[in-house]
Image (cartoon, rainbow, N blue to C red):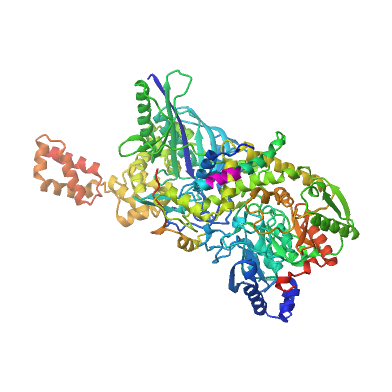
Amino acid sequence: MSHNVVDKKIVEYVSHLARIDIDNKEKERLTYELSKIIGYIDKLKELNVDSVVPTRGGFSETNIFRSDTAERKDYFVDMLKNAPAQEDNHFKVPKIIE
Amino acid sequence: MSLELLDLHGWEISQKIKETKISEEEVFSFFKERIQKLDKHINSFVEIYSNPVRESKESSLCGVPIAIKDNICIRGKRITCASQILNSHNAVYDATVIRALKDKGLSIIGTTNMDEFAFGSSTENSCYGPTRNPWNLECVPGGSSGGSAAAVAARLVPFALGSDTGGSIRQPASFCGVVGFKPTYGRVSRFGLIAFGSSLDQIGPITTNFVDCAHLLNIICGFDEYDSTTSKKNVPDFTKSLIDNIRGLRIGLPREYFGEGLDSEVEKAVRETAELLEKEGAKIVEIALPHTQYAVATYYIIAPSEASSNLERFDGIKYGMCKKNEDLLSLYKNTRKEGFGREAKRRILIGTYSLSSGYYEAYYIRASKVRTLIKKDFEDAFLSVDAILTPTSPVPAFKLGEKVDDPLSMYLSDIYTISANLAGICAVSFPCGFTKTNLPIGAQLIGRPFDEETLIRIGFTFQQRTDYHKRIPPLVGG
Amino acid sequence: MEYEIVIGLEVHVQLATESKIFCSCPTDFESSPNTNICPICCGYPGVLPVLNRKALELAVRVACVLNCRVNKRIYFERKNYFYPDLPKNYQISQYELPLGEEGFLVLPSSKKIRIKRIHLEEDAGKLIHKEKYSLVDFNRAGIPLLEIVTHPDISSPEEAFSYLNYLKMTIQYIGVSSCDMEKGFLRCDANISVKKKGSESLGTKVELKNMNSFRGVKNALSYEAQRQINCLKNKKNIFQETRLWDEIKQKTFIMRTKEEAHDYRYFPEPDLGDFIVDDILIESQKEYIVELPVAKRERFIKMYGLSDKEVDILISDLSLANFFEEANKQLFQPKSIANWILGPFLELVNSLEGGMDKVELSPYNFSKIVQYFLEGKLNNLAAKKLLALSIRNNKPIDEIIEEEGLSQVSKEDELIAFVEESLKENQRAVNDYLGGKQQAVMFIVGQVMKKTRGKANPKVVRELIERKLKQKE
């Protein structure tokens, strides 16, 4: 019986970082599942990768630029309409407790 | 006359329209009625448009209906990634590929079902319920582009677009008996594709045959100034590769793909495919892709990491679902709790974990390094072969519910498709046989970066000599 | 002082581009809320960033002028955290490999402040806090920012002020940003600690935020330094924390909740490729590097014989400094020209919306005004009026003088009648003067000026009056 690679505390921490609320039942299930998955992923530790350069993305071109020309388009009309909460042409958010 | 449409592929339909043997409206109505009649069994569509979304009138495929996976933005249309959190989202702009389809006069008929945010290999993780495999309604169509693959297989639409991050076009194509092409990373713009794994995602065509596939690739490939990851490499006319000749081509069979876990019927069908290709003049060579066993682990760090970051934008503030709350933190946590399904949450948490302080080196960086090794495996292999032939999936379509509670087992079934995304190279699945229970079997061809042409040539040649791609599921009139 | 202050500054500068860093939305700050927005800068599903070439060029320019080592192959990273002004809930920034490293800025005091790093990133939107909720305006989201971080080389609040001033001027001089802190184009956070003089180990670092002006930064640092020194003296603990500056109360206070250490989960931005900063790009940006503020200051003091204070104002704006120099090329009268610029000219410029940008008057015509004043062709009032009339349109000076009749009247025979009239009408002033009150003559001069509607040469008038009055004695 393998011990949990990922324990409840880590699941709590990570779900807070990801801003997802999880109840206790979910926490249990996720701890078990994540533990199993990360346990499998630890397979990568078998390899010696010291001298290997990490791959950083899938792109093939460098120096892809846009020119500095400004265009005002009218997306904002639809975008403000899409806002779940809106006031005075601003997006509205509940109280930020600092 | 209408039923003849079932025997025609997309390009042939467009020819008939051009020859005024049939009108666009008739074609659209035909498929729309078919969807309305038959999709209740399959559940492949999310939205069906009463009127086609189309614009200009020119090109080789004009007037032909096409279905779009529910993660590609169509301006003014409801695009949800099969997720509650985007339930009320109407796209405010067209994806570049949609612009391309509109410019070439195709008719968009609707959006297709998928695993939520493309997280899955079975299209069971959808807020609209699962899509069923038209060959056997108790089986999954594969995922995450299951809706697109099922719709094309059931001839509800001549072709569709899907997206592929770890096999999401190819695997459902193989489960449904259709052709699913993942172009080289950078061939097709991702602007407007709701991102899952940014360094892995590509949009690609799902068709019944390689002719339509080549035509669609012609339309959607090309450098895009809105996508910094697209390639400036010249896009050839892929239809010029529709040649019935593979003499001298060297095709590799990687030994790691023919070992434990591979279903015997699948293996038989793929080996018979190799024999056919050899008869046509190709040279079959055994090759090695030594880091194959690490591909799933590598992918399931990199993809969820990128996804966890890409999905941070769904916060109930700018668009989509919003769970009203007294304070900001509760807004975030409850919206995302209610809005994301189980698999989405799992992936976000795995990804967040892999990137977090203390784990980043051991997981994300390490996986990025193994990715380099996997890429090199292919670079080495392509020194001695022109294409690689493998099964697309270790098993044919499994039963609904079979793997849904065992995520790791679901992940492991991606073993054959995942490496092509990690290496950024092109790959295609095409039907190469059927099981005893009449489930399709798919073979996969993997090609050099930007060498879609060789894969099309091999596939086309194969389809000149077989009729697997012409078979229609009995349920829908085959 | 038995304690030493150790300060590091982190400055964010908005780059003067027409469009945002990753999309083509305009960057003007005058637009109504949420009109300079598009799906890309607002993190809509499916969008992708594409880098504004000008933003990279301007960033390279700053890296060069600050003597940084420019990294030749750079990439961007995502900084992940949730906040409503951050549309994607991650910011595209740089971490491992910033654009420039290990540069420096030398202050007029000759103190060298080392620059640890400079990097490019996108700005966030603006939040307006109401009582029970907040409102977000994304106009600012996506504007290109340059982050400039110093080593903790600054040793006093005054030095911090000087650094900010010279950094601002330097960046302004090379055309990268107006650095107007009031408009939010430049923002500054500070790190400060204190230690016993001579001690090797640094004290506990406190982060200061919410300073809205250079003076605010100076005052915040002064207050905080004293607070920390008091803590040490009273053997109280200094905690590593973030404190906010209260401009009204002139104190720093701790942020209400203890800010947890952010786990930003930096990783390379997969939607952007690498950028090669080659020698051609670097050389092309070096061409914009003009004479810098410290050098200009030294030269002005030497060449024009002006005071430190006068020079400081002249060089604070490059277009003002250039105006001054051009005027002196026509008429080498640095002291007078400086007086006229620092006085009436600047007063007018500051009242113009857009400042120096809106000045149409050429340095040549300006020098002419000063010349006429010095020659006595115009009196003080007339010259000021002429300046006000020509600053927006640069009409030929002689034309305006003609039209407005601004020529000063200096001929005695033209003025004598007015003088005699005024003397007659102002017996009391005359008597006061004769009675010993010398200054009463100025009152009579004023009356003549009134009668001549400001055109009389006040010196000549005064002479005439005094001569007449002497005759009376």
Magenta stretch, main secondary structure, is helix
The part of the image, by quadrant, that contains residue B116 is bottom right
Q: Nearer the viewer, residue A85 or C75?
A: A85
Give the quadrant of the N terminus of chain B: bottom right
**Relative image position of residue B461 (x, y in whole percent):** 84, 63
**Relative image position of residue B85 (x, y in whole percent):** 52, 57
Q: Nearer the viewer, residue B149 or C344?
A: B149
Determine if residue C200 is in view. Answer: yes
Q: Which residues are magenta?
A: A26-34
- Whether C45 is drawn above or below B4: the answer is above
The part of the image, by quadrant, that contains residue C217 is top left
In the displayed structure, does residue B454 sit left or right of residue B332?
A: right
In the displayed structure, does residue A58 sit left or right of residue B265?
A: left
**Residue C381 on the magenta segment:** no
Q: What residue lies at 70% left-to-right and 33% top-to-bottom?
A: A50
Q: What residue lies at 62% left-to-right and 61% top-to-bottom?
A: B130
In the displayed structure, does residue B319 sit left or right of residue B421?
A: left
